[in-house]
Structure formats: C-alpha cells, structure tokens
C-alpha cells in the first residue's frame, strides 16, 4: 500500500488550543485584575464571618472559597508565563509552546507547524509537529522519519520552496537522493529568463568557473574581490564577491548599478542551487514537481477542510504531536478500509 518511491513533504499551520495570548503588559494588567478580584472575595468573606457556620455547614470552615482557589491557580500560571517571557513578544497561556506564526493569508495566530511525508498514493508515512515558523529546518528530519517508518531508502523527494536552503542542498547532495525543491527565487528567475525582464539582474550574468569570474550582460568582466565567510548570527554566509573592472565608462551603468562598480555575490554552494534549477526547468522535472499538489497537499486538505481539524484541543508540543498523530492514524485507517472494500468488490466480480 505504501512504498518508498516518491515522497512529497509539506507543512501546514494548525491553530493552538486557545486565543488567550498576550504580551508582558497584557499579562501584567490581567494579573492586577486577578489580584483585585481575590482581594474583593477576601473582603466579602470577612464581612460574612458572622454567618460562617451557616455558609460552611458540616465542613471545617477554613477551606478557601472556590472563587479564590480558581483565581489563585490562574494567578500562579500567569506569573509562571511572565517569568518565561524574557525575550518579549506574546505568549499563549494555555499552550506556551505555540508560536505566533504568519499563515497563508497574512494572519498571525498562535499555531503549531504540522509536517507530513506522503506517498504518491496519499498515504501518510511521516507526521510531525514543530514550533519552527518556517519549514526549511524540517526537511532532513521528515526524510529520515519516512525512511524509518517504511524501512526503505527514498528514491525521490518533492518539497516546495519553503524547504529550500543551501544547507538542505548540501544535505540532499550528500545523501544522493533525487530531490525536486525549488528555491524561493526560482519563479522570479524563470519569469526573468522567459520574459526578458530585468536584463541586468545577477541571474543574467554568466558565471565562468574555469576563469573564476562573471561576465555581465554587456560582456564586461567581474573579477573576484574578496570572500565573505560568516558562521555566526542569523545570516550565515559563504560568499565570493565579484567586482566589475570596466564599469565607469559603460553606457548602461545607470541601469545596472548605483555604485562605482557592479558587484555580484556568489554563494560557494550556488552550484547546487543552479543544478536544482536546471533540473526543475526540464520537462521531466516539471512533471515530477507537479505531483506535489495532489500528493502532499491532499491529506492536509482532507484533515482541515473535510474533517474540520483546524484547532488543536490540547496544549504543549508533546501533547499536540500526539493529537496530530491520532488524526493521521484515523486518516490512514480510512485509506486502508477503502482499499479493503475495493479489493472485496473486485473479488465479488471475479
């Protein structure tokens, strides 16, 4: 029913179990209201001391009123969340593991990032839930999980541009897995090449690896000026900077650059990106990549829109992951049932 032929990987956001999300100022205001309510309840209790026996009946009479117990518990939880909010931003009280993630239509909600690895027959062979807002960190883990579950090596992997990165290009090249994953600028690059737009864009300069230089659209040479290597910070770079040698007297300089000379930054791993782009531009590459829409996106569409799984009921990543796996188990059981029924009908006809 499921084999490790072609696997499509996709991610989708599902809302956290509650909308009770605030920043530190919001929690501070909420905490003050809770403390004021507790003070009012205690004041009311003092005013009713005279009728205590009647109010508590056979109980000891020293139990905290239910309203205080609930508010004290809520106060404790708010204080815990506020202690953890060192980096600012907003936090969800019921599910502090949830992250504020921008969804497809630009709406930002506390959500979990759900991941699926799916076969061509739309069987789920690898589900997961992560708190990362982007998908590119999940590619390696989803591939390896699918292989563990299937006990086979994958032949082909298809994933959208959200999974593209130089690190993933290196990972896929090291595995020698046939992959089809466009980068974030692939569509723009294709439009430029097909429509002749932005003639002086970097993609229209020709890299000459044997000469270690670039040739601009006007035929002028850009030679290596420096290397820019950075392994720290949010943006990690492994680049070579090429600089134009004859830009000053070029008649199209104003159309090309506002600097004294045109520069081009080339990633040391850009060969891998160019190989992926070339593969996706072939007829076979287009055909394979088109499988993604009716493979990986179909289970999410069924779970969210047909079955109505749009919001998690539980909180914390561990519990949400278990809840999502139960959804996927139910989905696969329905696939198995339909397969058994189909085979039974075929045997009756025989």
Image (cartoon, helix red, strand yellow):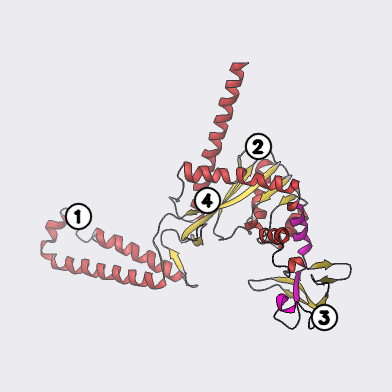
User: Viewed as shown, does residue 81 lie left or right of 191?
Assistant: left
Q: Give the mark, 3 or 1, whose residue is nearer the N terminus.
A: 1
To which residue does mark 2 refer?
2
User: Viewed as shown, does residue 46 lie left or right of 232?
Assistant: left
Q: Give the mark, 2 or 3, whose residue is nearer the N terminus.
A: 2
The tag on residue 59 is 1
Per the rendered image, the range of residues in magenta is 252-279
Q: CA distance from mark 1 to mark 2?
A: 62 Å
User: Viewed as shown, does residue 211 lie left or right of 124?
Assistant: right
Q: Quadrant of the C terminus?
A: top right
Foreground mark, 1 or 4, reads 4
Foreground mark, 1 or 2, reads 2
Q: Nearer the viewer, residue 186 or 51?
A: 186
Q: CA distance from mark 3 to mark 4?
A: 58 Å
To which residue does mark 3 refer?
246
Q: Is residue 308 magenta?
A: no
Q: Give the mark, 4 or 2, whose residue is nearer the N terminus.
A: 2
Secondary element at tag 2: loop
Q: Nearer the viewer, residue 50 or 178?
A: 178
Residue 182 x, y percent position in the rendering: 69, 56
Q: Residues within 10 Å of mark 2 (few under 14, many from 20)?
A: few
Snapshot quadrant of residue 71: bottom left
């Amino acid at each position: 029913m499921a084999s490790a032929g072609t696997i499509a990987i996709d991610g989708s956001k599902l809302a956290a179990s509650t909308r009770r999300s605030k920043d530190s100022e919001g929690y501070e205001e909420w905490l003050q209201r809770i403390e004021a309510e507790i003070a009012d309840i205690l004041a009311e209790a003092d005013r009713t001391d005279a009728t205590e026996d009647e109010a508590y009946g056979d109980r000891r009479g020293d139990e905290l009123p239910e309203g205080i117990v609930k508010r004290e518990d809520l106060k404790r939880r708010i204080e815990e969340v506020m202690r953890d909010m060192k980096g600012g931003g907003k936090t969800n009280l019921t599910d502090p593991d949830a992250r504020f993630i921008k969804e497809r239509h630009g709406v930002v909600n506390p959500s979990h990032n759900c991941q699926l690895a799916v076969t061509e027959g739309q069987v789920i062979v690898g589900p997961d839930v992560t708190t990362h807002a982007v998908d590119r960190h999940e590619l390696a883990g989803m591939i390896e999980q699918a292989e563990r579950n299937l006990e086979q090596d994958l032949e082909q992997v298809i994933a959208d541009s959200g999974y593209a990165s130089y690190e993933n290009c290196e990972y896929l090249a090291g595995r020698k897995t046939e992959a089809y994953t466009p980068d974030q600028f692939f569509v723009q690059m294709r439009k430029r090449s097909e429509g002749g737009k932005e003639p002086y864009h970097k993609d229209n300069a020709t890299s000459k690896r044997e000469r270690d230089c670039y040739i601009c659209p006007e035929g002028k040479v850009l030679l290596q000026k420096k290397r820019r290597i950075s392994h720290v910070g949010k943006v990690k770079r492994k680049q070579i900077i090429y600089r134009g040698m004859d830009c000053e007297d070029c008649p199209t300089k104003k159309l090309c650059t506002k600097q004294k000379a045109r520069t081009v930054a080339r990633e040391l791993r850009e060969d891998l990106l160019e190989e992926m782009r070339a593969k996706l531009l072939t007829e076979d590459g287009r055909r394979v990549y088109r499988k993604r829409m009716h493979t990986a996106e179909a289970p999410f569409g069924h779970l969210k829109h047909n079955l109505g799984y749009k919001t998690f009921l539980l909180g914390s990543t561990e519990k949400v992951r278990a809840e999502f796996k139960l959804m996927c188990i139910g989905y696969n059981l329905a696939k198995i049932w339909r397969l058994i029924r189909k085979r039974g009908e075929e045997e009756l006809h025989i």
